[in-house]
Amino acid sequence: MSNFKYAAVNEAVVYQNVVNDKGKKAVNRLLMGTYVEILSEQGAWCEVKPFGTHGWMHKDSLADTMGLKIFFLDVGQGDGVLIEIGKYRILIDAGPNSSMHNYLTKWQYTYLLKAGHTVHIDYLIVSHFDTDHYRGCIRILENKGFTIGTVLHPGILKFAEKGNPYDTGLGETVKENGVRYLTRIFDNLLTVKSPAPFNRDITAFMNALHGAHGEGRVQKVKRCAAGDVIINRTIDGQTFRLDVLAPMLETVGRKKAFVYWSDEGKTINGHSIVLKLTFGSRTVLLGGDLNSASQSYLIDAYGQNNPFEVDVAKSCHHGSSDFTEDFMQRVNPYATVISSGDNEGHAHPRADAIGCAGKYSKSRRPLVYSTELARSTNLKKNTILFGMINLRSNGKDIFMSQMKEVKNTADLWDSYEVQ
């Protein structure tokens, strides 16, 4: 047996010892795909050292392959998703603050970083340039402990209007057949000279991006659009694909252009990068901040084709009321994850979004998760512990879990099978 394995089942039990070929006293439970170091073997049992309390696991609870892991991190009012599968690490947005950076450096990859290793992120995907999605990327780009293969973005940046660095405009627009279009699109952010006429946060992002590229820590920067396939590989004997479903470009006067909706906010949000992840027979939709206008637009664009139906969906725009029931019917997931925060004027998630997430589901018992509810508060220490929603899949089964507020390693997780 190799010197490491992965948990083959969800909430795999780690026992304190083995007596008469039976595990005695559960001391730890591991989510599917958790890395386990093998210390020794004893018949059908292995002495293991996972993160946390170690002990003994039955060999039937161990596998050679990790499978798919998706971490929906509580970053406050924003989005932050980390995907691990095979040798790939994919980061989709990083929230508005340092929460994602802190999680990566002080928890997920702390041992690698403390040992002097660099952490390679294969893809850093900025779904769109609203601060609650990209500002947290700045510290990651600035941290010399991280290297990044490709930064992907939708091609729309915010400009600073003259005399007020906090107001933004979207640059050049034209009208054709009564429809307004945005025609200033950025393909490669590395060709944009600095300083550029952007608002304060975009300027900070651009400076961090250029700095990381200059140090050789960012290899490529590309715009992506509907029809692109970011990854199409066989991993653990199964297909893993990451398809781009949006944004969609049109051609206006020989120029590529985005439809401009009623204001800049709806236009930026509506042209978020929308991703469909496929692993084996299971699927996940990551929809950025799509709104009613863009959802209707995409439904019309795809016509009879419906690529949006999945097993698990990250709710668009933090559970905003700005959605269409038609789109939610098309997504039709078993489980929905809503990423939002406290102390924000939008009151996300909205009651109708939560209700419709349950109503428009293919499951008899729909699962609706909230990153806010995954958060724990220790009243005795007056501290807040930011949490996450864990998704684990072997390509056939999906389990979703979050930690219980009272921490007990022998009974740590609240888990459900997605079905």
Image (cartoon, rainbow, N blue to C red):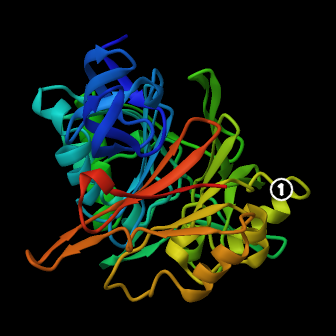
Q: Residue at x 84, y 71 (%)?
A: 177
Q: Position of residue 22 (x, y in %)?
A: 36, 32
Q: Position of residue 207 (x, y in %)?
A: 26, 49
Q: Nearer the viewer, residue 134 or 201?
A: 134
Depicted 17 relative to depicted 339: above or below: above
Q: Nearer the viewer, residue 372 or 233?
A: 372
Q: Position of residue 401 (x, y in %)?
A: 44, 56
In the picture, which quadrant includes the N terminus?
top left
In the picture, which quadrant includes the C terminus?
bottom right
The quarter of the displayed image where residue 273 is located: bottom right
Q: Nearer the viewer, residue 334 or 251?
A: 334
Q: Which residue is mark 1?
A: 302
Q: Residue at x 53, y 50 (%)?
A: 399
Depicted 292 relative to depicted 371: above or below: below
Q: Residue at x 66, y 39 (%)?
A: 228
Is residue 200 in view from this perspective? yes
Q: Position of residue 144 (x, y in %)?
A: 18, 36
Mark 1: secondary structure: helix
